[in-house]
Image (cartoon, helix red, strand yellow):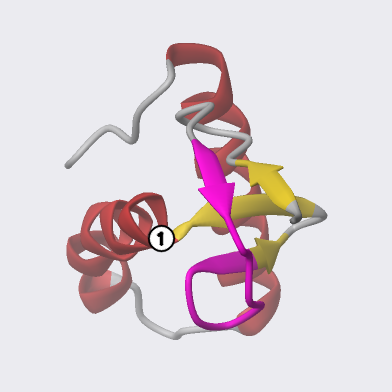
C-alpha cells in the first residue's frame, strides 16, 4: 500500500491517485482539500488582474504554495 504526504498540511494521503485525491503542482504534492484552499485563496486575486498572463499566475501559485508550506495552511485573501 502506498502513502503520500501533503507538502502543505502534512496529512497522509492513502492510496494516492494523481488528479483525484492529490495534485502535483509546482513540484509539490498537495491533497485535495489544500488544492481547494489554494484555488479559493487565488480566486479573488485572479479576478482583479488585468491583463491576465500565465507567467504571472504560475509565479503567484508557486509563491502561495511556498508560503503555505511554511505556515501549514493557505491564507484566504
- In percent of the image, x 69 and y 47: which residue is there? 3
Kindly give the residue lying farthest to the front in the view shown.
1
Q: Position of residue 60 (x, y in %)?
A: 55, 54
Residue at the top extreme, as displayed: 71
Question: Which region shows up in magenta?
Answer: 12-23
Residue 13, magenta (yes or no): yes
At a point 58% along the width and 40% down the height, the residue shown is 6
Name the residue rendered at 70%, 73% in the picture: 55
Which of 62 and 29 lies nearest the eye of the viewer? 29
How many numbered marks appear?
Answer: 1
Tell me the quarter of the image containing the C terminus: top left
Mark 1 falls on what kind of element?
A: helix
Q: Residues within 10 Å of mark 1 (few under 14, many from 20)?
A: many
User: Percent x, y for residue 63?
Assistant: 60, 41
> Which of the 4 quarters of the picture holds residue 1?
bottom right
31 relative to 52, above or below? above
Residue ID for mark 1: 35
Q: Position of residue 29 (x, y in %)?
A: 68, 52
Q: Is residue 6 above or below residue 9?
A: below
Q: Nearer the viewer, residue 16 or 24?
A: 16
- Judged from this view, the residue extending furthest toward the right is 27
Q: Is residue 1 magenta?
A: no
- Viewed as shown, does residue 69 lie left or right of 32? right
Quadrant of res 72: top left
User: Residue 27: image x %, image y %?
Assistant: 82, 55
Amino acid at each position: 500500500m502506498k502513502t503520500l504526504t501533503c507538502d502543505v498540511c502534512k496529512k497522509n494521503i492513502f492510496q494516492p491517485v494523481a488528479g483525484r485525491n492529490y495534485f502535483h503542482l509546482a513540484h509539490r504534492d498537495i491533497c485535495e482539500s489544500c488544492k481547494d484552499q489554494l484555488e479559493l485563496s487565488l480566486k479573488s486575486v485572479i479576478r482583479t488582474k488585468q491583463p491576465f498572463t500565465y507567467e504571472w499566475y504560475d509565479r503567484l501559485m508557486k509563491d502561495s504554495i511556498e508560503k503555505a508550506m511554511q505556515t501549514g495552511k493557505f491564507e484566504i485573501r
